[in-house]
Structure formats: structure tokens, C-alpha cells
Amino acid sequence: MEYVGIVDFKSNNSNSVLSVVVALGIEARLITSEIEIFKADRLIIPGVGHIDSIVNEMDELGIRDSIISFAMSGKYLLGICLGQHLLGSGSEESLSVNTLGILDFEVSRLPSNIDAGFRVPHVGWNSIIFDNEYALFKSIPNGSDFYFSHSYAITTPTHNAMAVTEHSVPFTSVAGENNVFSVQFHPEKSQKVGRKLLHNFCEL
Amino acid sequence: MSGAKNFEACVSRHYSELKMVGALKSQLSIFESNKADELLVINTSKSPGPLDVDFIQTIRESIEILSTPIMVGGGINAIDDASSLIGVGVDKVLCGTATFNHSLHTKIANLFGSQALSVSIDYSIGPEGIFVGYSERFLHNLNSFKALIGRIEGSGAGEIVLNRIDFDGTKSGLDLETLQTVLSIVSIPVVLASGAGKPEHFIAAFEAGADGVATGTFFAKMDQNPLQLRSRLFNAGVNIRI
């Protein structure tokens, strides 16, 4: 039976992602093991909190290698928020942890600019601007607002940027290459356009 | 056999008069379909001790049918309360200030990130000064109030929600002065609540720098809906999603 595997870290909001995906009529389940990752048709990695917590949990579950193998298999993978940071090459939030390095980008702290009204954490709805008609954004108008809630982001430009957002500085809100995608915002909390993006991901 | 108690949504005046407006889950759904940017639920019936499992279950069941950010508060006094709520999909927990629990805030921020911790400043202003808190009140002057705000940011809060108790439910306008005082002290986002009665109140708050405005009475007891308000704000030049 094909299913979308949603990696269930203790401290993340995997239940929110699961209920939205299931409500779209898609077979999905929360997973924590190597074998479940291997058998998944598609993988979503949600994440909230701190990069060191999610890395530690991933290693405690012993699923680092299986996530990497999944990415290399060509099957579709989506990282959400901290899940995006996990896929990159490193995060300023904790320079001592080893993130997965599946996508080539660095994560840094978002600077604030109080005078211009940009406070950190960046919490609230903000627009994503994409430079191409990617299948992931099918039927999503360019400039649509999604819900963000973070203090760290991909602020250094990266070649795998698919969409950018501005909050004090421009940052890469969607990064992806081949079969691996990652979003800084929370599609499961972004109402209609968020559900559309998750639907599009599951249709790739 | 289990069943979550049918929690009722209500609006308040001066925090004490509560008026029921409908079942919680359906009220939240209605706001979502009207494009609310975020939902805020405060459990007014919280008694001492850990959070009621029925309440957590109701929140879980609500989140299962929603795809909108949700903040929940009301008697969060221990890390387990915060963990339970975040575990069922709550995006931010709202902690009160009466007795400022620095160590709880720090634990929550360290475990879940600052963006998961909002701190509510419940206050009223009188000739004697600024009373902070609701069930227990502490008198401050402007300087000690400012120092408290600074310490709250320092404890790891990712957002401050200003609730002026004596404006709550009055529809006479929001406390822009205290908003500006707090904005000048902290670098984190500030949400203003209590007292909105006209679209102009919202516009003024956003123009004064509020990152968000929270309201209950405006929609529940008046012939207003979020979609209409959003259009009004957008037309007035507020940077709002429509």
C-alpha cells in the first residue's frame, strides 16, 4: 500500500501535517523507523524547535542514513520549517550539529530591522515570489502568502532557490533540487494555498 | 468511553463577564473560513494543576479540522502543559504574567523555540499606576513596567500580547500608548488586544506599529466579519493578506 510517510519527531507538529494531508484524501501515516521510511512512497519531514533537538532525535531514532538514501532514491521528499534546515549543509543556530547536507544551503539567524518594522522571530503571513512555473506551485498565484514562524532562515543566496520572501532581508523560502524540496513556511497552517502546495507535492 | 466536553467559545468584558457565543470547534472553523490570520484560544476555566485532558483533546480535535495557526493559553504553569499543547499541533502557547515565571519561559523557549512562546501582559491602568495581572495584581510604575517587559523578552518570549483588562470588551479603542511603549523596549513582535470596536481602531494600531491585533468581541457581538474587516484594512493601506 502506497503512503506518504510523515516523520514523527517527538517535538514537532507532525499531527498537524498528517491531518491536513489525510483531509486531502491522501494515504499518509506518521513514521519513525528505517523500514517505514524505506517503504514510503513519499516523505515529509516537519520540524519545529531547535536544530540540535531535531538532529539528536533523528540520530536517536537511527534514521539519518535512511533519509539520505530516500533522497538518493529519487522518491519525493519535502522538508518543512526546521525540516528544511535539517536538509541543508548547516545552521548557525547550532554549528556543532551535523545536518543532512542533502541540499546545498546554509541557514543563518534572520537579522531584525526595528526601524523598518521587521522584528524577529518572523511570525505571520508573508509572500513567496517564485522565478519559475514549478509543478510544486501549480495553481498557486505568484506572491501568495504563507504562514511563517522562525528566527533562522536561508539568508545566503543559493543556487537551488525556488522562491524568495522578504523579512528585513530576502531569504530563500523554498529551496529544492530534483526530487528534494524544502519550505521555510508551514503549508499545514497556510489555509487554502498551503493545502494546495501539499496536494501538489503529493501529485509530483 | 471518552468524549471531550463540549467547550464553549465566549467573549469577555473586563475579563469577568463571559458571554457564550458557540461551540469552540465550530467557532474556530468559521474564523478559518473567514481567513483569520491566527486563532487565539484562552482557557478561562483552568483550575490549578495540569491542563484538563478534555481541553487538550478538544484542541487536538479542532486542529485536526483546521489549517490555520493557533495560539492557546490559560493556566500554562508547567512545561508539561506547553508540551501537551504543542504535541497536538498548537503553534504558540500563551503564558500569563501575573507572577512572571522566568524559568518556565526559558524552558519552553529552549525546548520549542522562542517562536512557540507568546507572553500575555494583562494589565489595567489607574491613577495609582499600572496593575499587571488579573487574579493576582502587581502595581508598577512606568519604569518598573518597562523593566518587566525587558525581562520578559529576556526570558525567551518570541512575542508579547498586550491585553488591557479595563478596555476589554468595551469597543472603545485599543491602548496605542502602551503599545508604543512596549514596541520601543523589545525587538520581538507585539500583538495588541482588548478594546477594538471599529475598523479605524485596527488601522490605527497597525499604523502605530502593532504586528497583530487580536479581537473577540468585535466579531462575536457585532455585525462584522473578518473578510469585510480585511478588505477595509487593505483599502486603508495596511499590509494585510486578502
Image (tube, coloured by chain):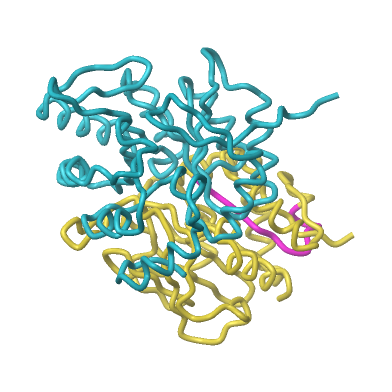
Chain colours: A yellow, B cyan
Q: Decide whether residue B192 is among the magenta residues.
A: no
Residue at the image point whose x is 56% and y is 38% from the top: A11
The C terminus of chain A: image quadrant:
bottom right
Q: Decide whether residue A47 is among the magenta residues.
A: yes
Q: Does the image show residue A55?
A: no
Which residue is more in the foreground, B110 or B185?
A: B185
Count the marks. 0
**Whole-percent x, y for residue B150 in the image:** 20, 33
**Whole-percent x, y for residue B10 in the image:** 54, 35
**Whole-percent x, y for residue A163 in the image:** 46, 75
Report the span colored magenta: A37-48
Which residue is more in the foreground, A172 or B186?
A: B186
Q: Does the image show residue A152?
A: yes
Residue at the image point whose x is 36% and y is 35% from the top: B168
Please give left or right for residue A149 compared with residue B6 in the image: left
Residue at the image point whose x is 30% and y is 54% from the top: B201
Please give left or right for residue A173 compared with residue B159 in the image: right
Q: Is residue A59 above or below residue B227?
A: above
Which residue is more in the foreground, B90 or B45?
A: B45
The N terminus of chain A: image quadrant:
bottom right
Please give left or right for residue A53 compared with residue A200 in the image: left
Residue at the image point whose x is 67% and y is 46% from the top: B26
Q: Is residue B218 above or below residue B11?
A: below
